[in-house]
Image (spheres, rainbow, N blue to C red):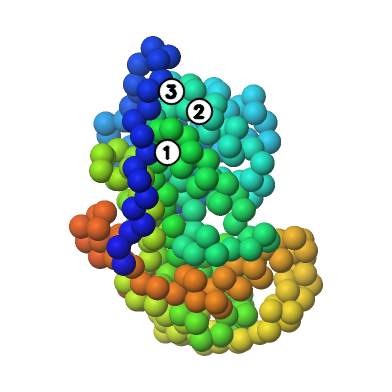
Amino acid sequence: MTPTTPTPAPTPTRTTGQRASSDILVLGATGKTGRRLVARLRDTGGARVRAASRSGETAFDWTRPDTWEPAFAGAGAVYLVAPDDPSPVREFVQRATESGVRRFVALSGHGIEKAGPDFGQGMVAGEEAVRTSGVEWTVLRPNNFFQNFDEDLWLPPLRAGRLALPIGAMPEPFIDADDVAAVAAKTLTEDGHAGRVYELSGPRALTFAEATRTIAEAAGRPIRYEELTPAAHRAELVAEGWPEAAADALGAMFALHRAGHTAEVTDDVHRVLGRPPADLAPWAQRVAAQGTWAP
Protein backbone atom coordinates (compact mmCIF):
# COMPACT_ATOMS: atom_id res chain seq x y z
CA MET A 1 0.00 0.00 0.00
CA THR A 2 1.30 3.45 -0.83
CA PRO A 3 1.71 5.37 2.42
CA THR A 4 -0.41 8.43 2.96
CA THR A 5 1.69 11.40 1.90
CA PRO A 6 0.14 14.66 3.03
CA THR A 7 1.91 17.89 2.23
CA PRO A 8 5.18 17.77 4.19
CA ALA A 9 5.31 19.87 7.30
CA PRO A 10 6.87 23.29 6.65
CA THR A 11 10.36 23.97 7.80
CA PRO A 12 10.04 25.81 11.11
CA THR A 13 10.99 29.46 11.14
CA ARG A 14 11.50 29.90 14.86
CA THR A 15 13.94 32.58 15.89
CA THR A 16 14.46 31.44 19.43
CA GLY A 17 18.20 31.15 19.01
CA GLN A 18 18.14 27.64 20.50
CA ARG A 19 20.78 25.27 19.17
CA ALA A 20 19.52 22.09 17.52
CA SER A 21 20.02 19.03 19.69
CA SER A 22 20.44 15.37 18.82
CA ASP A 23 18.78 14.33 22.08
CA ILE A 24 15.72 12.14 21.55
CA LEU A 25 12.92 12.01 24.10
CA VAL A 26 11.09 8.68 24.09
CA LEU A 27 7.73 8.79 25.85
CA GLY A 28 6.21 5.53 27.06
CA ALA A 29 9.75 4.24 27.44
CA THR A 30 8.66 1.23 29.50
CA GLY A 31 5.97 0.22 26.99
CA LYS A 32 6.07 -2.34 24.20
CA THR A 33 7.53 -0.12 21.50
CA GLY A 34 9.17 2.44 23.77
CA ARG A 35 11.58 0.14 25.58
CA ARG A 36 12.56 -1.54 22.30
CA LEU A 37 13.12 1.85 20.69
CA VAL A 38 15.31 3.04 23.57
CA ALA A 39 17.46 -0.09 23.33
CA ARG A 40 17.76 0.21 19.54
CA LEU A 41 18.73 3.88 19.61
CA ARG A 42 21.33 3.29 22.30
CA ASP A 43 22.77 0.30 20.44
CA THR A 44 23.23 2.34 17.28
CA GLY A 45 24.56 5.42 19.06
CA GLY A 46 24.66 8.91 17.62
CA ALA A 47 22.07 10.44 19.92
CA ARG A 48 21.47 10.77 23.60
CA VAL A 49 18.21 9.07 24.51
CA ARG A 50 15.90 10.17 27.32
CA ALA A 51 13.77 7.23 28.40
CA ALA A 52 10.69 8.88 29.87
CA SER A 53 7.79 7.44 31.84
CA ARG A 54 6.32 7.72 35.30
CA SER A 55 8.77 5.10 36.54
CA GLY A 56 11.55 5.59 33.97
CA GLU A 57 14.97 7.20 33.95
CA THR A 58 13.42 10.53 32.98
CA ALA A 59 10.36 11.31 35.08
CA PHE A 60 7.32 12.10 32.93
CA ASP A 61 3.64 12.09 33.78
CA TRP A 62 0.91 13.37 31.46
CA THR A 63 -1.14 14.43 34.49
CA ARG A 64 1.75 16.49 35.91
CA PRO A 65 2.71 19.28 33.49
CA ASP A 66 5.60 20.23 35.77
CA THR A 67 7.37 17.06 34.54
CA TRP A 68 7.09 17.99 30.87
CA GLU A 69 9.70 20.71 30.46
CA PRO A 70 12.49 18.89 32.30
CA ALA A 71 11.86 15.98 29.90
CA PHE A 72 11.81 17.86 26.60
CA ALA A 73 14.09 20.84 27.34
CA GLY A 74 16.98 20.71 24.88
CA ALA A 75 15.65 17.68 22.99
CA GLY A 76 15.52 17.79 19.20
CA ALA A 77 13.07 14.95 18.57
CA VAL A 78 10.23 13.26 20.44
CA TYR A 79 8.64 9.82 20.14
CA LEU A 80 5.09 10.70 21.11
CA VAL A 81 2.96 8.03 22.77
CA ALA A 82 -0.22 9.88 23.68
CA PRO A 83 -2.30 9.05 26.76
CA ASP A 84 -5.86 7.75 26.54
CA ASP A 85 -7.06 11.17 27.70
CA PRO A 86 -6.54 13.49 24.72
CA SER A 87 -6.79 16.74 26.66
CA PRO A 88 -3.09 17.41 27.46
CA VAL A 89 -1.60 16.40 24.12
CA ARG A 90 -1.87 19.64 22.15
CA GLU A 91 -0.41 21.74 24.97
CA PHE A 92 2.49 19.32 25.37
CA VAL A 93 3.33 19.42 21.67
CA GLN A 94 3.09 23.22 21.58
CA ARG A 95 5.35 23.63 24.60
CA ALA A 96 7.85 21.09 23.27
CA THR A 97 7.98 22.87 19.91
CA GLU A 98 8.52 26.22 21.59
CA SER A 99 11.35 24.62 23.57
CA GLY A 100 13.15 23.61 20.37
CA VAL A 101 11.85 20.16 19.40
CA ARG A 102 12.02 19.99 15.61
CA ARG A 103 10.72 16.48 14.91
CA PHE A 104 7.88 14.34 16.23
CA VAL A 105 7.18 10.68 15.53
CA ALA A 106 3.71 9.87 16.85
CA LEU A 107 2.55 6.34 17.61
CA SER A 108 -1.03 5.82 16.50
CA GLY A 109 -2.97 2.81 15.20
CA HIS A 110 -3.99 1.25 11.89
CA GLY A 111 -7.49 2.40 11.00
CA ILE A 112 -7.61 5.00 13.77
CA GLU A 113 -9.21 7.55 11.47
CA LYS A 114 -12.32 5.32 11.52
CA ALA A 115 -12.41 4.95 15.31
CA GLY A 116 -15.39 6.04 17.35
CA PRO A 117 -15.40 8.13 20.53
CA ASP A 118 -14.77 5.17 22.86
CA PHE A 119 -11.39 4.18 21.43
CA GLY A 120 -8.13 5.82 20.48
CA GLN A 121 -8.97 9.47 21.05
CA GLY A 122 -5.53 10.07 22.56
CA MET A 123 -3.92 8.77 19.37
CA VAL A 124 -6.23 10.92 17.26
CA ALA A 125 -5.22 13.96 19.32
CA GLY A 126 -1.55 13.04 18.95
CA GLU A 127 -1.84 12.89 15.18
CA GLU A 128 -3.63 16.22 15.00
CA ALA A 129 -1.18 17.91 17.38
CA VAL A 130 1.94 16.93 15.46
CA ARG A 131 0.37 17.70 12.08
CA THR A 132 -0.26 21.28 13.17
CA SER A 133 2.97 21.72 15.14
CA GLY A 134 4.87 23.59 12.42
CA VAL A 135 7.82 21.18 12.62
CA GLU A 136 8.63 17.83 11.01
CA TRP A 137 6.27 15.00 11.89
CA THR A 138 5.69 11.36 11.03
CA VAL A 139 2.79 9.17 12.14
CA LEU A 140 3.12 5.41 12.69
CA ARG A 141 -0.09 3.38 12.57
CA PRO A 142 0.68 -0.25 13.45
CA ASN A 143 -1.66 -3.20 13.68
CA ASN A 144 -2.05 -5.31 16.82
CA PHE A 145 1.32 -6.38 18.17
CA PHE A 146 2.52 -9.98 18.42
CA GLN A 147 3.39 -9.02 21.99
CA ASN A 148 -0.27 -8.67 22.94
CA PHE A 149 -0.22 -12.47 22.97
CA ASP A 150 2.78 -12.90 25.28
CA GLU A 151 3.17 -9.78 27.43
CA ASP A 152 -0.21 -8.77 28.76
CA LEU A 153 -3.56 -8.48 26.99
CA TRP A 154 -4.14 -12.05 25.80
CA LEU A 155 -1.45 -13.88 27.76
CA PRO A 156 -3.66 -14.99 30.70
CA PRO A 157 -6.43 -16.49 28.51
CA LEU A 158 -3.90 -18.25 26.30
CA ARG A 159 -2.27 -19.80 29.36
CA ALA A 160 -5.74 -20.85 30.52
CA GLY A 161 -6.30 -22.58 27.17
CA ARG A 162 -9.11 -20.40 25.82
CA LEU A 163 -9.01 -17.10 23.94
CA ALA A 164 -12.52 -15.73 23.45
CA LEU A 165 -13.06 -12.54 21.45
CA PRO A 166 -15.73 -10.79 19.35
CA ILE A 167 -13.83 -10.57 16.05
CA GLY A 168 -15.34 -13.17 13.72
CA ALA A 169 -13.52 -14.14 10.54
CA MET A 170 -12.05 -10.71 9.85
CA PRO A 171 -8.27 -11.09 9.54
CA GLU A 172 -5.62 -8.97 11.24
CA PRO A 173 -2.03 -8.58 9.92
CA PHE A 174 -0.35 -8.71 13.34
CA ILE A 175 3.03 -6.97 13.62
CA ASP A 176 6.10 -7.45 15.79
CA ALA A 177 6.68 -4.51 18.16
CA ASP A 178 10.38 -4.84 17.29
CA ASP A 179 9.54 -3.85 13.71
CA VAL A 180 7.56 -0.85 14.92
CA ALA A 181 10.53 0.22 17.05
CA ALA A 182 12.87 -0.20 14.08
CA VAL A 183 10.66 2.04 11.94
CA ALA A 184 10.44 4.57 14.76
CA ALA A 185 14.23 4.66 15.06
CA LYS A 186 14.61 5.31 11.34
CA THR A 187 12.03 8.07 11.26
CA LEU A 188 13.46 9.76 14.34
CA THR A 189 17.05 9.79 13.11
CA GLU A 190 16.89 9.94 9.30
CA ASP A 191 15.50 12.51 6.89
CA GLY A 192 12.90 11.78 4.22
CA HIS A 193 9.93 10.82 6.39
CA ALA A 194 8.44 14.23 7.20
CA GLY A 195 4.71 14.56 6.57
CA ARG A 196 4.18 10.82 6.09
CA VAL A 197 1.72 8.41 7.67
CA TYR A 198 3.01 4.83 7.70
CA GLU A 199 0.45 2.04 8.07
CA LEU A 200 2.56 -0.74 9.63
CA SER A 201 1.34 -4.30 9.22
CA GLY A 202 2.83 -7.76 9.36
CA PRO A 203 3.41 -9.78 6.18
CA ARG A 204 0.10 -11.65 6.19
CA ALA A 205 -3.37 -11.32 7.62
CA LEU A 206 -4.54 -14.02 10.02
CA THR A 207 -7.82 -14.45 11.81
CA PHE A 208 -7.58 -14.58 15.58
CA ALA A 209 -8.56 -18.24 15.33
CA GLU A 210 -5.60 -18.87 13.00
CA ALA A 211 -3.25 -16.91 15.26
CA THR A 212 -4.44 -18.92 18.27
CA ARG A 213 -3.87 -22.15 16.38
CA THR A 214 -0.35 -21.01 15.42
CA ILE A 215 0.45 -20.28 19.06
CA ALA A 216 -1.06 -23.57 20.24
CA GLU A 217 1.04 -25.52 17.75
CA ALA A 218 4.18 -23.68 18.85
CA ALA A 219 3.33 -24.28 22.51
CA GLY A 220 2.55 -27.95 21.91
CA ARG A 221 -0.67 -27.83 23.87
CA PRO A 222 -4.38 -27.33 23.19
CA ILE A 223 -5.53 -23.70 23.15
CA ARG A 224 -8.91 -23.01 21.62
CA TYR A 225 -10.35 -19.90 20.13
CA GLU A 226 -13.98 -19.10 20.89
CA GLU A 227 -16.07 -16.48 19.14
CA LEU A 228 -18.18 -14.28 21.42
CA THR A 229 -20.79 -11.64 20.76
CA PRO A 230 -19.67 -8.12 21.71
CA ALA A 231 -22.11 -8.15 24.63
CA ALA A 232 -20.86 -11.50 25.93
CA HIS A 233 -17.24 -10.37 25.62
CA ARG A 234 -17.95 -7.18 27.56
CA ALA A 235 -19.73 -9.18 30.26
CA GLU A 236 -16.73 -11.48 30.63
CA LEU A 237 -14.33 -8.54 30.94
CA VAL A 238 -16.44 -6.84 33.59
CA ALA A 239 -16.78 -10.12 35.50
CA GLU A 240 -12.98 -10.42 35.46
CA GLY A 241 -12.72 -7.00 37.10
CA TRP A 242 -12.12 -4.73 34.12
CA PRO A 243 -13.43 -1.16 34.58
CA GLU A 244 -16.45 -0.58 32.41
CA ALA A 245 -14.73 2.23 30.49
CA ALA A 246 -11.82 -0.06 29.65
CA ALA A 247 -14.18 -2.84 28.57
CA ASP A 248 -16.00 -0.36 26.33
CA ALA A 249 -12.71 0.82 24.81
CA LEU A 250 -11.65 -2.73 23.99
CA GLY A 251 -15.07 -3.40 22.53
CA ALA A 252 -14.74 -0.32 20.33
CA MET A 253 -11.34 -1.53 19.15
CA PHE A 254 -12.82 -4.85 18.10
CA ALA A 255 -15.67 -3.05 16.34
CA LEU A 256 -13.00 -1.27 14.29
CA HIS A 257 -11.47 -4.63 13.40
CA ARG A 258 -14.80 -6.28 12.57
CA ALA A 259 -15.53 -3.46 10.12
CA GLY A 260 -12.35 -4.36 8.23
CA HIS A 261 -10.54 -1.08 8.85
CA THR A 262 -7.36 -2.82 10.02
CA ALA A 263 -7.36 -5.87 7.74
CA GLU A 264 -5.20 -4.64 4.87
CA VAL A 265 -1.62 -5.87 4.55
CA THR A 266 0.70 -2.98 3.70
CA ASP A 267 4.31 -2.75 2.56
CA ASP A 268 5.27 0.29 4.63
CA VAL A 269 7.63 -1.65 6.92
CA HIS A 270 9.54 -2.76 3.82
CA ARG A 271 9.51 0.79 2.44
CA VAL A 272 11.19 2.16 5.55
CA LEU A 273 13.45 -0.73 6.59
CA GLY A 274 14.26 -2.31 3.23
CA ARG A 275 13.19 -5.73 4.50
CA PRO A 276 9.89 -7.52 5.10
CA PRO A 277 8.27 -7.48 8.54
CA ALA A 278 8.55 -10.48 10.86
CA ASP A 279 6.08 -13.34 10.56
CA LEU A 280 4.02 -14.57 13.50
CA ALA A 281 4.87 -18.28 13.24
CA PRO A 282 8.68 -18.09 13.78
CA TRP A 283 8.12 -15.57 16.55
CA ALA A 284 5.64 -17.90 18.25
CA GLN A 285 8.16 -20.74 18.10
CA ARG A 286 10.80 -18.63 19.83
CA VAL A 287 8.43 -17.40 22.50
CA ALA A 288 6.95 -20.84 23.14
CA ALA A 289 10.45 -22.25 23.68
CA GLN A 290 10.67 -20.01 26.75
CA GLY A 291 7.60 -21.63 28.28
CA THR A 292 5.56 -18.45 27.94
CA TRP A 293 2.24 -20.16 27.18
CA ALA A 294 2.61 -23.06 29.58
CA PRO A 295 -0.45 -23.42 31.85
Residue 180 drawn at (x, y percent) = 38, 55
Asked if residue 210 is positioned above or below residue 33 in the image, the reply reads below
Q: Nearer the viewer, residue 220 or 111?
A: 111
- Residue type pointed to by label 2: Ala
The image quarter in which residue 75 lies? top left
Q: Secondary structure at mark 1?
A: strand
Residue 97 drawn at (x, y percent) = 47, 27
Disc 1 to disc 3, C-alpha distance: 11 Å
- Residue type pointed to by label 3: Gly
Q: Secondary structure at mark 3?
A: loop
Residue 155 drawn at (x, y percent) = 56, 69
x 57%, y 32%: residue: 92
Q: Residues within 10 Å of mark 1 (few under 14, many from 20)?
A: many
Disc 2 and disc 1 in contact, CB within 8 angstroms:
yes
Furthest residue in direction top, as rendered: 17
Q: Which mark is drawn over residue 100?
A: 3
Disc 2 to disc 3, C-alpha distance: 7 Å
Disc 2 to disc 1, C-alpha distance: 10 Å
Residue with the mark numbered 2: 96
Residue with the mark numbered 1: 104
Q: Quadrant of the C terminus?
A: bottom right
Disc 2 and disc 3 in contact, CB within 8 angstroms:
no
Q: Which mark is drawn over residue 56?
A: none
Residue 162 drawn at (x, y percent) = 60, 82
The image quarter in which residue 105 lies? top left
- Residue type pointed to by label 1: Phe
x 60%, y 49%: residue: 122
